[in-house]
Image (cartoon, grey):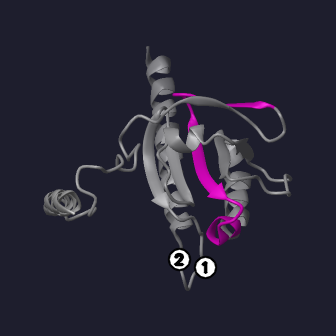
Amino acid sequence: MKRLGLVLLVVLIAAGFYRSSLSEETATGTLTLPGPAPNVGEAAETFEARRQDGGSFELSDEGVYVLTFWSVFNRDSVAARPELAELAREYGDEGVSFAAVYIGGTPRDTDVPYTVLLDGKGELTSLYNVTRVPRSFLIEDGEVKLVQDGFLLGSEEQPGSGEQMEDELTRVLEERSDRAHGVEEKKRRA
């Protein structure tokens, strides 16, 4: 009986010590997962992944990408599909690559203007430290330009976060165009 009392006392002391070392933000002490990454201004992780149609997709450190993490079981992800398709139709001809990484299965409808990536083992989800969906990244030349949770264009009465994606995408493409014209102008002058 004394042993049981001693063990109980040790457990209570250890629990009290652990409880006193908790972080106010996470309430998990020092046993926390890394924060969401990559963030705006940081390098985007490059990768090559299998597409749903069996082909290959590469996210390199050159070009403009919209990378979205979704789940077929998440109603916000399902609701955002038409809006990503709209953006992909509008900006796909301007050299932007759109890809959706589905966590936990893929949709049956594969007739979409963006690439559907398979992530059965969760490697891409882990690479981008995605803990909730939908989560989207706008990447230009290997640098994260925008990270957002949720993805809805919304209406005029109720704007959504997809409008932020569209605004930032427009800005990135305009800056790329300005840089390209500046290089051409310098070549002509030389």
Q: Give the range drawn in magenta.
A: 55-78
Query: In the displayed structure, does residue 40 sit left or right of residue 91?
Result: left
Q: Mark 2 points at which residue?
A: 159
Rendering quarter of residue 38: top left
Q: Is residue 185 magenta?
A: no
Quarter of the N terminus within the rendering? bottom left
Crowd rating for badge 1 (residues with CA inside 10 Å; few <14, some 14–19, many 20+): few
Q: In this rendering, does residue 157 appear at all?
A: yes
Tag 1 near tag 2, CB within 8 Å: yes
Numbered disc 2: secondary structure: loop
Q: Identify whether 166 is placed above or below 101.
A: below
**Nearest the camera: 139 or 79?**
79
Q: Which amino acid does label 2 sit on?
A: Pro
Q: Does the magenta stretch include residue 59?
A: yes
Q: Identify whether 152 is placed above or below 156.
A: above
Crowd rating for badge 2 (residues with CA inside 10 Å; few <14, some 14–19, many 20+): few
Can you give x and y, in whole percent of width and height, for residue 152 in the image?
A: 59, 69
Q: Which residue lies furthest to the bottom in this view?
A: 157
Rendering quarter of residue 12: bottom left
Q: Which amino acid does label 1 sit on?
A: Ser
Can you give x and y, in whole percent of width and height, for residue 140 in the image?
A: 49, 38
Residue 106 is marked as: none
Q: Identify whether 24 is placed above or below 32.
A: below
Can you give x and y, in whole percent of width and height, for residue 90 in the image?
A: 70, 54
Which residue does the image show at 76% across and 38% down from the upper left?
Answer: 51
Quarter of the C terminus within the rendering? top left
Q: Mark 1 points at which residue?
A: 155
Which residue does the image show at 85% across and 57% down from the upper left?
Answer: 108
Can you give x and y, in whole percent of width and height, for residue 72 in the image?
A: 71, 61
Which residue does the image show at 57% across and 33% down from the upper left?
Answer: 63
Which residue does the image show at 63% across and 57% down from the upper left?
Answer: 70
Per the model, the C-alpha gap separating discs 1 and 2 is 5 Å
